[in-house]
Amino acid sequence: MDDGHINDAELDALFGGQPPKPALPPDGVFRTPSGRDLSRYRATSFISDRSRVSPWLEAMFMSAMESIQRKNYADAIRHLKRCLEDNRDFIDALLWLGRLEDEPDVRREHLKAVLSLQPANGDAMRELMILDGELDPDQPFDAFTMPEVRHADGAVAAQARNLRCPRCGSPNLSDDDASPNILTCDSCGYTLEKAANTGGMQSLTRALLLRRSQEVVWVVGARTLKCHGCGAERTLTAKQMSSECPFCGSRQVIEQDALGTLSQPDTIVPFRVAGRAALEQVKKSLDGTVERLKGFFVENRVKRVAIEGVFLPFWVFDLMADITHNYEVVESKEDQHGSIFTLSAAASRRTYSEKISDGVMNLTAPAVKQPTPAMLARLGRYDYSLGVDYRPEYVAQHSAEIYTLDFDKAAMDAQSRLSEHMRQKHRCNDSRYRTTSITSLVTQASFRLVLVPVWAVTLFERDGDVRSALVNGQTGEVVLGRAVKPN
Ligand SMILES: [Zn+2]
Ligand SMILES: [Zn+2]
């Protein structure tokens, strides 16, 4: 501590003496000078950011907490600012100033400083969302409260976008196989170029806070859709995102429903493999390794083939984490002169701890239950960098599915996969080092909803068996299902 660093009043605050008279506000409520009620904030002796704390800083922070407890606004602010003079990246002080300061812009600045150091800091994110009017400050909140899940009675009205050519109004827009980023009108030849992917990642922390602030999460069984073309109403299943009107042929893509249950996709990966090429790939797989039956198609065993292009939804996560690797150095029992050490087992081990920053990009979780995760995994990877920003028009002539598995469940799964991946990647077990434990703390998490192209193929065989196959619409990778007798 250098000279002049601390004044008398602060020395008093730090090292006792007479506790200063509590400067209680007139109505006994903890308020900012402009009158904002601060009583929902509770002072704490817990410091989350231990990495930046000197004993002096800790004492100063505790003085700030005491001031808050005494409802002494001016002292609390002063002590917190002194903390930042000592270390301007001290997260706990930044967060408290973000809560207590009067000016919204000053608060925002402090909260953003926390999030730039710790993007997954839920306290700072929540405060910022309250400040921006996205969350209700009066809503009781704790980390374990989850919204009630309720099933909607009957079909819920859907809001849909009509898909049609902007020039001639025809519903027949199709992807050009040769150039997957161009959408062409089959009637008048108008072309629409798909915009490049701009990323479209959302903060997972923010999305989880919004989710927890909901009182009810609705589960929808079916949706009704009123045709924009002819006015006829039809019912879609919960997972159907696009549909063609059987009466007038116009096409619609669902954007939202009356209960607000839907998030729009962020990215769509276009088809690069045409339907015919996909069927060729399926034939090859059947005639080749899997069936070991020569000429499966030549022998005319397949009576009929149905093929449909469908966009399936996946949650895609980017996760960064602080990894703590604890390991021990295994000492050789023998020194260089050949004499044997007779140290006890405990004494022959020294334990160390290292911190590593690491992360995983494009961690993918299916957002539908069918096809099974195992089958979808066998489709292989998609190159998301070839995706484009989602627009309903791009679903065009294919169908698309709505996610039925929610992002919060998928996020838990993604985080446990990250931990497992980090344990595999950083563990060591050789003659010198042995890992004792590896823990991962997610520091930054973002995600997006991506639609990926899949050809769903159904083969109806002469003996009555039905076999399904999936083809990766981007790479042509084939996954064959088993032949089953339909019941
Ligand atoms: Zn047209
Ligand atoms: Zn219609």
Image (cartoon, rainbow, N blue to C red):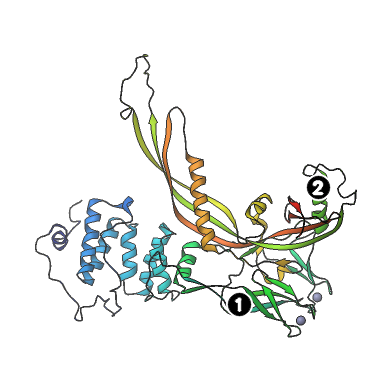
List x then y, in percent, for residue 43: 26, 65
Q: Nearer the viewer, mark 1 or mark 2?
A: 2
Where does ligand 2 appear, by image quarter? bottom right
Q: Residue at x 28, y 67 (%)?
A: 42
Q: Is residue 484 left or right of residue 390?
A: right
Amino acid type for the residue under numbered disc 2 = Leu
Q: Is residue 323 above or below residue 76?
A: above
Secondary structure at badge 2 equals: helix
Q: Is residue 130 visible?
A: yes
Q: Is residue 197 visible?
A: no
According to the image, label 2 marks what residue?
286
According to the image, label 1 marks what residue?
257
Between 296 and 351, the residue placed more toward the observer is 296
Residue most extreme to the left = 18
Q: Is residue 115 left or right of residue 56?
A: right
Q: CA distance from mark 1 to mark 2?
A: 42 Å
Q: Earlier in the sequence, mark 1 or mark 2?
A: 1
Specify the label residue 427 is tagged with. Answer: none
